[in-house]
Amino acid sequence: MTLYNRKLQVPFRGKSRLLPLDEILYACWKDGKTIIHAKEIDGLWLAKPLKEVEETLVPLGFARVNHSTLVNLNHVTKLQGHPERYVLVSGTHRIDVSQRKYPHIRQLLTQR
């Protein structure tokens, strides 16, 4: 993963673009690729495993909430714990939180 001054280098319309980390809402693993969902641009495909993206972004305010999704904690607007466990990202994206990861996510969000 390539970061430049808190910006992630991503392919966009055949070119490389520097996407500010604060614009990234979440990333998920689907069909063998990592998909980045951002405020203005949705569905950027990276040919990198989510594990590699996670290693780069977790120290910068992101957290893995389930097997296939990494969220930007700065955009989490709600954490629901019972009866269903999920986070609401940017008020509109509902993402399930695994039972195993829920205590860690709750701790990270209360520390903000």
Image: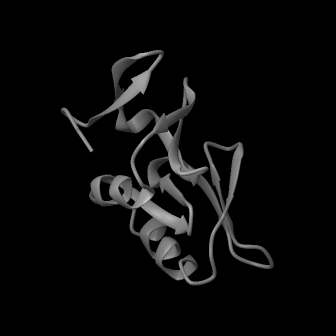
Q: Residue at x 36, y 55 (%)?
A: 61
What's the colour scheme? one colour
| Residue 29, placed above or below residue 83 | above
| Residue 103, placed above or below residue 19 | below
Q: Quadrant of the N terminus?
A: top left
User: Picture coordinates of residue 89 (x, y %)?
Assistant: 61, 49
Q: Residue furthest left?
A: 5
**How many numbered tags mark residues here?**
0
Query: Which of 55 and 21 lies nearest the eye of the viewer?
Result: 55
User: Picture coordinates of residue 70 (x, y %)?
Assistant: 49, 57
User: Picture coordinates of residue 41 (x, y %)?
Assistant: 55, 25
| Quarter-of-image position of residue 5 | top left
Q: Residue furthest front?
A: 32
Residue 38 in sight here? no
Q: Residue at x 76, y 78 (%)?
A: 82
User: Picture coordinates of residue 92 (x, y %)?
Assistant: 71, 42
Q: Quadrant of the C terminus?
A: bottom left
Query: Which of 75 and 4 lies nearest the eye of the viewer?
Result: 4
Residue 64 in sight here? yes
